[in-house]
Image: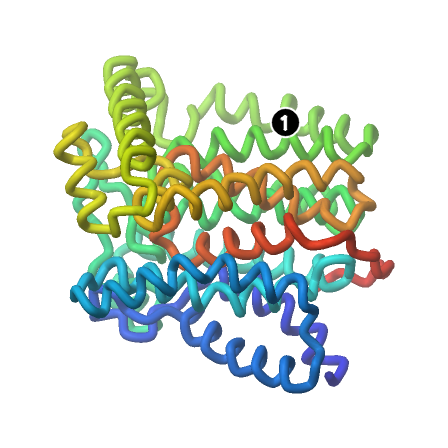
């Protein structure tokens, strides 16, 4: 492969995962840029197989991962279950993505470029949210950066929660928050300076404020703590701690957290929200155990609503179990646990970035049904393949700037 495309593709992969353009924004289930890329990567995969360049172990695991979605795709076509069909198809399109992303493992330069792609994509996501707040929705739709079905009907008090590029406030803020593990990977490997890191964190705070979302902030704080422990770089961890205490804490004390203090101090709303999430989680777990082969998307939602009065699981691991079956959900959960543990080699280890992304994504999954989003389907498929693939050798390179 020519040198320049080889350097560009990891960045482009990270960027497209975040900036997932709508190809037909007027459609309910518009094809996304990652769908088209998944189809192109499938062609690439066939060529690689023909040339005997595709390692056998990830390919075999990909076959296991794709078996359940393939079966559900078949039954969805027969029974005209459109929502399940779309989810199953996107899981299958995520498999070529995951196999392509396996090529960045063990290569510092490729991983850093992928991380920069996530950061630049996250910053674009912030810009989209700001432009929506300023009233440029039509322009964004024309550019494929928003959908005609974006949800502007959610409010906190009398303030609309800006839906962002992914059409819903929780989804968009969560995708933008992926810049946290990417930025801290670059910071701890010496590719990102503190002033740039502070600007990235400020962009995330703007996103969280305009979307009035809490869970990505909670997960981001936990990810920063996890990265500090995992990196084994005491000097940089102390620098981060000083920055957070001396700059961000006073800012929050003066101006309040994203969404304002009223949202965070409303104990009645917090208790109600926590109760709903606990009920839906327990209900989804029970339905998954009593019906371990899955319900499909719409029927699972209806069964959960009948059982708990709530139609969403508020947990992506249980969402997978409810839709595609308990085995698929357990494979997903185990993959995240294993990959998180594989990052113990520290900032110099080949799994530092994948481990940070797995930790952050798993945290997000504990709050919402993010596996409706092709961005997180791709990351989940990659996590599973990376978790159960043999150790990789690190390609040392320090030229990781974009």
Horizontally, residue 123 falls left or right of residue 317, namely right
User: Where 302 falls versus 218 (above or below)?
Assistant: below
Display coloring:
rainbow
Answer yes or no: is residue 327 visible.
yes
Question: Quadrant of residue 108 in the image?
Answer: bottom right
Question: Quadrant of residue 19 in the image?
Answer: bottom left
Horizontally, residue 294 falls left or right of residue 115, namely left
Q: Number of labelled discs? A: 1
Q: Nearer the viewer, residue 37 or 265?
A: 37
Q: Name the quarter where the C terminus is drawn.
A: bottom right
Question: Quadrant of residue 327 in the image?
Answer: top left
Helix, strand or loop at label 1? It is helix
Name which residue lies at 63% across and 27% down: 244
Badge 1 crowding class, 10 Å Cα cut-off, few under 14, some 14 to 19, many 20 or more, is some
- Estimate the x, y position of residue 353 in percent, counting from the top left: 68, 48
Q: Nearer the viewer, residue 214 or 43?
A: 43
Q: Residue furthest right?
A: 396
- Estimate the x, y position of residue 76 in percent, counting from the top left: 24, 64
The residue wearing badge 1 is: 244
Q: Name the quarter where the N terminus is drawn.
A: bottom right
- Estimate the x, y position of residue 46 in percent, counting from the top left: 57, 82
Name which residue lies at 55% across and 40% down: 334
Name which residue lies at 72% across and 40% down: 343
Horizontally, residue 372 falls left or right of residue 217, namely left
Name which residue lies at 27% across and 42% down: 161
Answer yes or no: is residue 369 visible.
no
- Estimate the x, y position of residue 332 in percent, counting from the top left: 49, 45
């Amino acid at each position: 492969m020519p040198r320049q495309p080889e350097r560009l593709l990891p960045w482009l992969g990270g960027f497209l995962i975040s900036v997932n353009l709508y190809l037909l924004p007027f459609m309910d289930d518009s094809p996304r840029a990652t769908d088209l890329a998944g189809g192109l990567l499938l062609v690439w995969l066939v060529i690689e197989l023909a040339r005997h360049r595709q390692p056998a172990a990830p390919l075999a695991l990909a076959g296991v991962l794709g078996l359940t979605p393939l079966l559900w795709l078949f039954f969805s076509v027969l029974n005209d279950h459109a929502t399940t069909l779309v989810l199953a198809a996107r899981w299958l399109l995520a498999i070529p993505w995951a196999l392509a992303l396996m090529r960045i493992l063990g290569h510092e330069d490729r991983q850093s470029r992928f991380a920069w792609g996530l950061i630049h994509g996250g910053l674009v996501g912030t810009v989209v949210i700001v432009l929506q707040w300023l009233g440029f929705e039509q322009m964004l739709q024309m550019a494929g950066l928003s959908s005609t079905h974006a949800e502007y009907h959610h409010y906190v008090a009398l303030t609309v929660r800006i839906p962002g590029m992914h059409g819903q406030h929780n989804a968009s803020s969560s995708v933008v928050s992926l810049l946290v593990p990417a930025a801290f990977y670059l910071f701890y490997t010496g590719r990102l300076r503190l002033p740039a890191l502070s600007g990235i964190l400020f962009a995330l705070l703007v996103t969280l404020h305009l979307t009035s979302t809490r869970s990505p902030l909670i997960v981001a704080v936990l990810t920063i703590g996890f990265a500090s422990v995992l990196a084994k770089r005491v000097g940089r961890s102390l620098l981060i701690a000083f920055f957070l205490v001396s700059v961000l804490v006073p800012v929050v004390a003066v101006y309040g957290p994203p969404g304002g203090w009223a949202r965070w101090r409303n104990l009645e709303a917090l208790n109600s929200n926590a109760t709903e999430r606990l009920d839906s989680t327990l209900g989804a777990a029970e339905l998954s155990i009593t019906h371990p082969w899955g319900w499909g998307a719409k029927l699972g939602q209806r069964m959960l609503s009948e059982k708990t009065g709530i139609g969403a699981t508020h947990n992506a691991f249980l969402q997978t179990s409810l839709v595609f079956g308990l085995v698929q959900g357990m494979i997903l959960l185990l993959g995240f646990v294993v990959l998180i543990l594989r990052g113990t080699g520290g900032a110099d280890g080949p799994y530092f970035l994948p481990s940070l992304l797995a930790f952050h994504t798993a945290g997000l999954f504990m709050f919402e049904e993010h596996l409706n989003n092709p961005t997180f389907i791709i990351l989940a498929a990659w996590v599973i393949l990376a978790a159960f693939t043999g150790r990789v050798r690190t390609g040392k390179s320090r030229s990781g700037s974009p």
